[in-house]
Image (cartoon, rainbow, N blue to C red):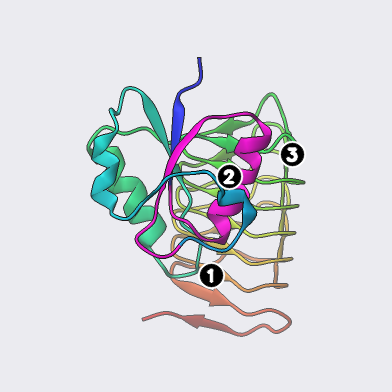
Amino acid sequence: MSKSLLIIGGGGHASVLIDILRQQKREIVGIVSPQAVAESNVFEGINVFLKDEDVFEFDKSSIKLVNGIGPMPKNDLRAIIFSKFKAIGYEFETVVSDNSIISLYANLEEGVQVLPGAIIQTDALIGANSIINSGAIIEHGCIIGRNNHIAPGATLSGQVHTRESVHVGTGASVIQNINIERDVVIGAGAIITSDVEPRTICYPARAVRKVIK
């Protein structure tokens, strides 16, 4: 039997996840959001808690958390929330849209979120707390690190390997057999044809790269 769900965050990303979960008839016991919840009908009827500590009111054996913190390049809040609650024994739900396509031979780790229209092919591995956003394509044999965000419409060809905390921007393309090291930001629309060093920003439509110091 599926556990009840508690959503962390009340912004736009959380609204997309709640929409998916409501369509799947999952029970949502509340939203934890210190900031005002976004204006959306999808939040109607759900209890809102204002402090992270309110999570502790829920028995960790009876619920799972959903990380609704929106992904932003070079912002660690989403990863911090995941690590904080994992360290004290809470589990995170893996959220997969019914309108995505995922191979039976792909592997999704804890807390992964796959949004509508995404495709994940055979032998792909998606690391914990990563997001495969709307319409993104992860081809065969790709290894996606923890805390990654593959933004809407991005394409990773076969056997791409990304390390931890990589952001692949909207509509970006990565050719096959590329290694992308940790803390990399690939700009929207960029085309990546060679390996990328750690803490690099890859700008679209030009061969200029800047190493973050």
- Which image quadrant: the C terminus? bottom left
Label 3: few (<14), some or many (≥20) within 10 Å? Answer: some
Q: Nearer the viewer, mark 1 or mark 2?
A: 2
Residue 155 located left or right of residue 36: right
Q: Earlier in the sequence, mark 3 or mark 2?
A: 2
Three-letter amino acid code of the residue under disc 1: Val
Lower position in the chain sequence, tag 1 or tag 2: 2
- Residue 57 x/y as whole percent: 25, 36
Mark 3 lies on a secondary structure that is loop
Residue 18 numbered mark, or none:
2
Residue drawn at the location 45% of the way across and 23% of the way down: 3
As displayed, is residue 136 above or below residue 26?
A: below
Relative to 123, is 138 above or below? Answer: below
Q: Position of residue 20 (x, y in %)?
A: 65, 41
Tell me which segment is drawn in magenta.
Answer: 8-36
Dot 2 lies on which element? helix
Label 1 to label 2: alpha-carbon separation: 27 Å
At mark 1, the secondary structure is strand
Query: Is residue 36 shown left or right of residue 17?
Result: left
Write down the residue under mark 3. 100
Q: Amino acid at mark 3?
A: Ser
Quote the CA–CA distance across marks 3 and 1: 25 Å
